[in-house]
């Protein structure tokens, strides 16, 4: 988030708005993830993106240390593999399961241990930029289920599991 910015300038608490959207250069997808976790507590996360940056991974590392993420599943694009491979060891330390697929979507799904759900469809890759980015945020269960089943299908039937490859390559557990 831009220094001095407050997420409440763009978003209402989840309990107050089933659907909401923003277009601004002041928010980053990591800001939105933290905002969701602050409201829902311990959650499982599924994220898709074309690419990821080291700066986003650092931010996610500190979010993970907060203890609110039960598991984190990430789908990145195969075409951005060179960048992904350069960050491979760091990704495997921060993300529970990472997959590579033909993917250009930018989706964030969050499900609390209490069953609350949030779907975020965004224009932003998992990178930091100063461009205007947009997002649609919904707590609608049917939207979440639909998108989650499509991500599950991509993971199960159309992806390469990066974490498994990393473990085999390094002999890590």
Image (spheres, grey):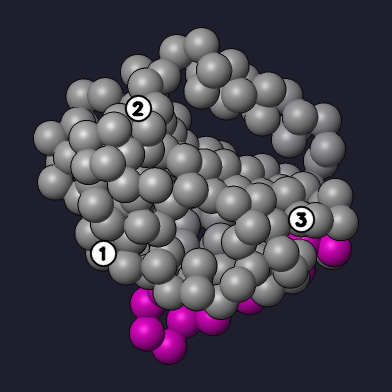
Residue 48 versus residue 71: which sits nearer the camera?
Answer: 71
**Compared to 13, does 103 lie above or below?**
above
Quadrant where the N terminus is found in the figure: bottom left
Q: Is residue 97 magenta-colored?
A: no
Span highlighted in magenta in the image = 1-15
The local crowd at label 3, few if under 14, some if 14 to 19, many if 20 or more residues have their Cα within 10 Å, is many
Quadrant of the rendered image containing residue 148? top right
Q: CA distance from mark 1 to mark 3?
A: 26 Å
Q: Which residue is mark 2?
A: 100
Residue 141: x %, y % from top left:
83, 38
Q: Is residue 136 left or right of residue 126?
A: right
The local crowd at label 2, few if under 14, some if 14 to 19, many if 20 or more residues have their Cα within 10 Å, is many
Q: Which residue is mark 1?
A: 55
Residue 171: x %, y % from top left:
27, 41
Q: Tell me, yes or no, if residue 52 can be seen here.
A: no
Secondary structure state at the residue bearing disc 2? strand
């Amino acid at each position: 988030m831009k220094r001095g910015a407050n997420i409440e300038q763009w978003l209402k608490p989840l309990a107050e708005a089933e659907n909401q959207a923003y277009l601004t250069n002041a928010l980053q997808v990591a800001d939105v993830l933290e905002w969701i976790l602050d409201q829902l507590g311990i959650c499982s996360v599924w994220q898709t993106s074309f690419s990821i940056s080291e700066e986003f991974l650092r931010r996610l590392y500190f979010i993970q240390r907060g203890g609110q993420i039960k598991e984190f599943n990430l789908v990145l694009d195969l075409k951005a593999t060179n960048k992904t491979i350069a960050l491979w060891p760091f990704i495997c330390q921060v993300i529970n399961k990472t997959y590579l697929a033909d993917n250009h979507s930018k989706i964030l799904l969050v499900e609390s241990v209490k069953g609350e759900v949030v779907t975020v469809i965004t224009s932003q890759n998992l990178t930091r930029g100063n461009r205007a980015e947009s997002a649609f945020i919904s707590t609608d269960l049917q939207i979440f289920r639909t998108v989650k089943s499509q991500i599950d299908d991509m993971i199960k039937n159309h992806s390469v599991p990066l974490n498994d490859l990393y473990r085999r390559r390094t002999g890590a557990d």
